[in-house]
Amino acid sequence: MERLRSFKPLSSPSTTFITGALIAAVVFYVVRAIIEPEVMIQTLAKALGLGATYAIVALGFVLIFKGTQVVNFAQGALAMIGALFVSFLAVDEHIPLTTIKNPLIGIGPEWFGWGLSVVVALFFAGILGLVLERVVIRPMIGQPLFSVAVITLGLETMLRTMANDSVRIQLRPLGIPWGTGGFTVGGETNDAGITTGGAFIAWSYVAAVITAIVAFLAVFFFYRSRMGVAMRATAFDQEAAMAQGINVGRVFAIAWIAGTILAAIGGIFATQPPIAQTGAAQVETQFIAFRALPAVILGGLDSVQGALVGGMIIGLAEITAGQYLSQYAGTLGSGYPLIVPYLVMIVGLLVRPYGIFGTPEVRRV
Amino acid sequence: MKAAKIWVLVLALVLIAAACGGDDDTEAGTTDDGDGGAETTEAAGDEGGEDTSGDDAGGDEGADGEAAELATDFGVTDDEIRIGYNADLSGIFATTVLPIIEATEVYWEVVNENGGIAGREVVPVILDNAYDVPKHLENYEVFTGDGAESVVMIGQSTGSPHTAATAELLVEDEIAAIPLTWYSGWPDPEFGQNVFEVQTTYCVESHNGMTYMAENFGDKVAIISFPGEYGQDGAQGAKLAAEKLGLEVVYDGEGAVVPGSDQTPVITEIVNSGADFVWTTINPTTLSEIMGGAVSQGFTGMWSGNSPSWGFQLLGTDLAEAADQFYVYSTYTALWNTDDTPGMTEVVEAMREKRPDAPVSDLYLLGWINGMIVQQVLEQAAANGDMTRAGVTEAARQITVDLKGLAPNQSWGGDPNDFIVRESYIYDIDLANFTPNGTVSDEDAGTGYTLIQGPFASPLAEEFVYDGPCFVAE
């Protein structure tokens, strides 16, 4: 926040560039909103949904990095496993990896049982994060960070391979109550009840935005707690934190539990519009982590607010480019939406090498 | 530290033992001399058991107990015949390919229980290409080498660009391949000489499907596809058909769908196109993303496409109701337990016996058909007394494969216009016929279809003159 307050629009080439880009973006959105207001509403809603999902996944990356100084390459596989846990509990109606029936099914209305199952699934995801931290990360305290990062790559391969076995032959529906439904702003409804035109806003966009708000508020308040301060101190300097009596192991554990739960939430939303339409865990679900990676880097790898802002910028750029440049796909290449997040990230890093809110590394010569 | 050393030692010993074990297993019975030259072996006597095939050339020889001389070079020993499967077990078509491989394995289990082929056990060597061309080529080298996993023919080659990458090599190595791809380049003697395509091509399938869609749903079409031999072959066929049928292509998205990308551009173009129907050549999960996105934005046109675009698994997802309402399924074969032809009875009974808990799937039929083809080719080669790679390839050109009602019979000899298959099937997606989590053992388990037409060849397909691939990558 301090960096935002000190932002002077035309004080350097980089701030001038950012200011110019922001003005151009605002002008573009205002003009398009005047020409086609419904298309713009839909585009913004979709971008918010995608951006919120990216922000949630990015927050998971950031928490683990802040707590342990490690980029966790297994986030995608953990997202997939989180989605699978929901499928096992809510649709197959049994406890993951067992044949024990899920006792929460049938309690209250259907959506209530589903909600409780999601809570339990996230609990299991947290346990998985704790186990991984205890078994393979904790023993590496004090070892080169590169080695720990490679360990997470190994974890990714193992977890992804196991998770893929569950979805290769059959997609795994999550039973999400709102499905691919939504509401339309404007448009015309015919006699058959089908609405054409207007701005379609999926309930999943709304759910992703609300979940992101809750997640970021929770982290915001957590950082003001005693444990949160300990985590921030550990992120700043592990050895100094240990010298001050901070239980660094506990910080590691909390970071991994929280990071894994956030990955799982991201995995659930990765089965939903605008990312997918099946409402089911599938092989592609795990790709959410790689799609969110530009948001993490752009926002700043060690910044919570960076995860939010980075997620929103990348979501907005990806959806806007997809919507308004579609007629130029022949010239740009049909895969151009894949490039947009990385293009934005590269430009962002050229201007701010540590990300928008990242902490510059101080080196003394 | 001492404990660590012991663990390292144990690990090293385990690795050495594993490596040695692999060699022992795979070298047993190998007759290859390593120089690629053919040698002769004796056809072992059939140990008994009933053969399931109607045309049992090699099996009969064995059953007579007479030792006939067989020329062999790679992949055939005194007691086994190795068939290669270069299959997508973990890539974007894994959902489709895994059940196919499962049924193929069941097929060989049944054949082997009944004495194998020419008295030899058939051993499928299955390698994962992950729908990746370099990996596919690596696997190909393994199959066509002279090592323990060398094979006499490639029973399945998944992927159009992948198989295209090996097309010339297949000719050089004199080895036959059955593609799990319906690219229109395979019947071309200049290109796919040793690729023995099964069923119709994407291009001809598009002619049939587009004809049905135009007759029933309107004359404005949007065409979308993956880039490459698969996607663009189907899209080119659809465009040829549109031209002949006088349809207006309101959105040409040939090659515009890139898997893993945000599909907003394609969805936007379809929604804005005013199309009466969309023809797709993509895969099921990408279809769900595009079709679901377009339908949710109010697009009410119909959808269809080349067979691999659809997977009945989508009926277990949030897309089910939209698919029931808007999707028409075009494909190449009969579907699971939808008739009582001899072929259907065999595959259903075998799957129930060997994999009673397997989820119900139409894809087993493709695996079963693949097994029938390979078996009949090998039996012809055995009858010819030549089970070298070249001999097996030649045998494939001599036969008409009887598919027992599962799909139109198949041959590969002579002019492509004489043997290309022109028939396909059209099904209505019907949720009422879908059984979630049904297994092959469930008598009434369905995959969600009602047959509309098939096997049928549209007038366009009947008149189609094959003079090369509909699409050639530049």
Image: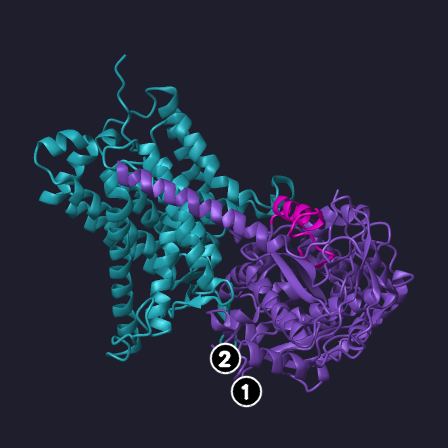
Chain colours: A cyan, B purple
Check disc 1: other Cα within 10 Å, few if <14, some if 14-19, many if 20+: few
**Which sits in the foreground, A240 or A272?**
A240
Q: Which residues are magenta?
A: B132-158
Whether pointer 2 and pointer 1 mark residues with C-beta atoms closer than 8 Å, the reply is yes
Q: Residue at x 36, y 48 (%)?
A: A75
Mark linked to residue B444: 1
Residue B150, magenta (yes or no): yes
Which residue is disc 2 drawn over?
B438
Above or below, B261 against A237 in this view is below
Question: Is residue B271 visible from the viewing direction of this image?
Answer: yes
The residue closer to the viewer here, B151 or A174, is B151
Tell me the quadrant of the picture where the N terminus of chain B can be found: top left
- Residue A117, horizontal then vertical, whole percent: 28, 69
For the residue marked with disc 1, what is the amino acid? Asp
Q: For the view shown, which residue lies furthest in the top direction? A: A365
> Which chain is indicated by disc 1?
B
Give how far across and how far down residue B270 sits, in percent.
60, 58
Q: Is residue B287 left or right of residue B167?
A: left
